[in-house]
Every structure is written in structure tokens, then in C-alpha cells.
Image: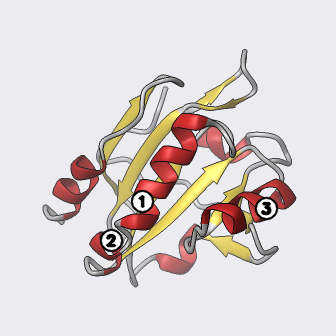
Amino acid sequence: MALQVGDEAPDFELKDNHGRTVRLSDFRGEKNVVLLFYPFAFTGVCTGELCELRDNLPQFTDRDTQLLAVSNDSMHTLRVFGEQEGLEYPLLSDFWPHGNVSRAYGVFDEDKGCAVRGTFILDKTGTVRWTVVNGLPDARDLTDYVKALDTL
């Protein structure tokens, strides 16, 4: 079961698409976080969602918010994907141990071996303040994220 509003977000440490270590705890007390899990790089719905976020990044940065996108792809896959699509925010690899962070957030599909479309908005204390989990084929609505951030 996915984390719920009011839950404390589990800390994690993952490599981004440039090989840098990113820890969720690095943002505590500093920024809100939109933590977005998606199934796979280079797929239609995922690419569309991530490019929409790219095109609207100021809606997050202007709200003192860090966007972190997590998939179970390798760091190397994410590097090529990020470069190809011009994605300027961290793409985090939950590749090994495979899906550990996705499981901790309750959004790993064991049958398919990937994360489902789960989004968690975390306040500066690391508490989940809003969440949505969609099935693999169902894109999320960016305007819902912005509305949720405006309530923080």
C-alpha cells in the first residue's frame, strides 16, 4: 500500500542521471519535494509526463520545491534519456537493489518489475501532504501538483 497523507516519507539515497548521490534528507528543512515515480524512460506516457514537467519547471522552483523523478531504470539509461529530452531536474535510479525505494513508498508493481505512477508531495519536514497513484497507462495531471503545493 502506498504512503498516505500524514506519513513521514522514508529517507533514501539514490544516484541521479549524472552519477551524483541524492538523499531525500538533504532537502529537509530547505525545500518542499515533489517525488514522482514513473515506470520506464523512453516510453510514451512517461516521456510526455516528464517533458510537461520540464516545460513547467518554474511552477515548482517558484514554490520553493525540488522535483525528483524516480524510475527503476539504470543511471546510464536515465543519463541518455535526460539528455535526449532536455530534462534539467534529477532523474533518480532505483535500479539496484531493484525497486527498494519504490517498495518503501508502496508503488512497486512486483509482477511488472517497475514502479507505477505514484506522486508524493512532501513538505519541508518530510511529511507527505498530498499523493496520487495511477495505473501504468494513466498519466497524472500537473495542475493537481501545483494546487497541492499552493496549500503548503
Q: Earlier in the sequence, mark 2 or mark 3?
A: 2
Q: Which residue is mark 3?
A: 80
Give the residue at mark 1.
53
- Disc 3 to disc 1: CB gap under 8 Å: no
Residue at 30% of width from left, 42% of height from top? 141
Q: What amino acid is found at the position of numbered circle 1 in the picture?
A: Leu
Residue 122 in percent (x, y) is at 37, 60
Q: Quick one: SS at disc 1?
A: helix
Q: Quadrant of residue 150?
A: bottom left
Which quadrant of the view contains residue 100? top right
Closer-to-camera residue (60/110): 60
What's the mark number on residue 70? Answer: none
Give whichever of 27, 51 is nearer the camera.
Answer: 51
User: Which circle, 2 or 3, is nearer the viewer?
Assistant: 3
Residue 105 in sight from this viewpoint: no
Looking at the rendered structure, the kind of residue marked 3 is Val
How far apart are labels 2 and 3 at the CA level?
Answer: 24 Å
Label 3 environment density (alpha carbons within 10 Å; few <14, some 14–19, many ≥20): some
First in sequence: mark 3 vs mark 1: 1
Drawn side of residue 91 relative to residue 141, left or right? right
Estimate the spatial distance between the alpha carbons at disc 3 and disc 1, rounded to whole Å.
Answer: 18 Å
- In the picture, the disc for residue 60 is 2
Asked if the residues shown at circle 1 and circle 2 are in contact, with their CB atoms under 8 angstroms apart, the answer is: yes
Left or right placement of residue 106 versus residue 103 in this view:
left
